Structures are given as C-alpha cells and as structure tokens.
Image (cartoon, rainbow, N blue to C red):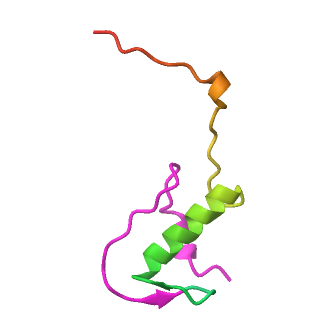
Amino acid sequence: QDDCSEFRSQFEAGGRLSCTRENAPVRDASGKQHTNKCLMCAEKFKKEAQRGGGTVQRNKLPASERTNQVRCS
C-alpha cells in the first residue's frame, strides 16, 4: 500500500514536493517521525528518485558532455 498516493501527482519533475508547514506529526514505516504527511512523502519520493526507482528519474549529463553557456547582451 502506498501511503503517499495522494501526493504522487504533485511531485514535480525536479524532484520536489511543495508542502505546508502544518504541525500534524506522523511516523513512517520505519518509525521515524515527520512534521506532517506531506513532508514524510517528500522525503520518501526524494529517496526513490535517488535510487532511480521512483516516480521521477533525473537525466543528468556526465561532466564530459556538459557545455558552459555564455550569456550575451
């Protein structure tokens, strides 16, 4: 069961979830306490994205393939 299903559609492509700062403590499956459910899910999604098994996978180019862009006026 996905306790964070209500927040998945709000998860941004950049790997972020915008949450309020309301104080409604909740514990995750491991027993860790979070300020509220949204912040708990944001941490969960971030970990999933870092492992590559989450909702969003970031596509980053290796340093050798990046180019520096110069801004012209």
Residue 60 location, quadrant: top right
Q: Position of residue 32 (x, y in %)?
A: 54, 86
Is residue 5 magenta-colored?
Answer: yes
Q: Residue at the location (44% across, 75% down)? A: 38
- Residue shown at 58% from the left, 74% from the top: 5
Q: Is residue 9 above or below residue 34?
A: above
Give the residue at the far top of this rendering: 73
The quarter of the image holding the N terminus is bottom right
Residue, far front: 63
Q: Residue at x 52, y 63 (%)?
A: 9
Height in image: 17 above or below 22?
above
Measured as percent of width and height from the top left, residue 14 is found at 50, 49
Over which residues does the magenta segment extend? Answer: 1-27
Which quadrant is home to the C terminus? Answer: top left
Q: Position of residue 6 (x, y in %)?
A: 52, 74
Left or right of residue 54: residue 69: left
Query: Image quadrant of residue 35?
Result: bottom left
Where residue 69 sits: x, y (%)?
46, 17
Q: Main secondary structure of the magenta part?
A: loop
Magenta stretch holds residue 70: no
Q: In the image, what residue occupies the spot 63% across and 86% down? A: 30
Q: Is residue 33 left or right of residue 62?
A: left
Name, please, the residue furthest toward the left.
73
Name the one closer to the observer, 2 or 63.
63
Count every numbered label the image shows and give the total.
Answer: 0
